[in-house]
Image (tube, rainbow, N blue to C red):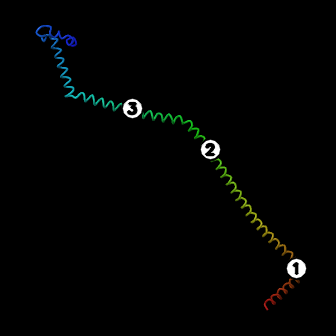
Amino acid sequence: MIAELFSHPSLLLAGGGGGFSNPDVWRVINLLVFVVILVYVFRNKIRIGSFFDNRAATIVKDLEQARRDKQEAERKLAEVEERLSRLDQEIVDIRAEAEREAEREAERIRQATEADVEKIRQTAQREIEGAMKVARASLRAFVADHAVEMAEAIIRRELSPEDDKRILSKYVDELHEVSK
């Protein structure tokens, strides 16, 4: 209806009295006045434009933050995917290193065992040699004791009382010569 009034100004004038007696015209004028007042109030008093501008700026900032967050998330996802792609290789590397370490440890234990065996062998050898020295010394003492006993027995058996007197007098003569 408003479009008709503006497109055909003759409708305003129709109806007699210059057209202002037509109720449709007054409705259009009232509507136009209401719209103008409404626009004025929203723009100047309520500042609806600045509200929408602020809201638009907030939305732009939020979108920008969301874009940055998305980029950060995509970057982290790429890092995680890269680490996951290297995970199989890292597992293979860790296993290989563990095997090498186990071999080194086994070699170290083998060498330590050999060194311990050598120390035990040397200690046993020293103990055997010490025991042999003690046994030889005991044997010498035993042989010497028995030799003295046998010699004493032979001397007692073979020595007569006259030999005793002769040895004793010879000993006394030697003492006199020394004391002079």
Quadrant in the picture for residue 127: bottom right
- Alpha carbons under labels 2 and 3: distance apart: 48 Å
The local secondary structure at tag 1 comes to loop
Going from N to C along the chain, the mark reached first, 1 or 3, is 3
Question: How far apart are the two marked residues, 1 and 3, measured between alpha carbons?
Answer: 131 Å
Image quadrant containing the C terminus: bottom right
Residue 49: x, y in percent? Answer: 25, 28
Q: Which residue is mark 1?
A: 159
Where does label 3 land, which residue? Answer: 67
Left or right: residue 134 versus residue 34 is right
Instruction: Kindly give the residue lying farthest to the top in the view shown.
Output: 15
Reading the image, the residue beneath label 2 is 100
| Three-letter residue code for mark 2 | Arg
> Which numbered disc flags the more N-terminal residue, 2 or 1?
2
Give the CA distance from mark 2 to mark 1: 86 Å
In the rendered image, which quarter is residue 138 located in?
Answer: bottom right
Give the foreground label among 1 and 3.
3
The 10 Å Cα crowd at callout 1, few under 14, some 14 to 19, many 20 or more, is few
- Camera-nearest residue between 91 and 2: 2
Q: Residues within 10 Å of mark 3 (few under 14, many from 20)?
A: few
Is disc 3 placed on a helix, strand or loop? helix
Give the secondary structure at mark 2.
helix
Is 102 situated above or below 6? below
Q: Are the two marked residues, 2 and 3, in contact with CB atoms closer than 8 angstroms?
A: no
* Point 73% across, 59% down: residue: 125
Of tags 2 and 1, the one toward the viewer is 2
Q: Position of residue 30 (x, y in %)?
A: 16, 17
Name the amino acid type tagged 3. Answer: Arg
Please tell me which of labels 2 and 3 falls first in the chain: 3
Residue 107 versus residue 75 in the image, above or below: below
Tell me whether circle 1 and circle 3 mark residues in contact (CB < 8 Å). no
**Residue 129 percent location from the top left of the image:** 74, 62
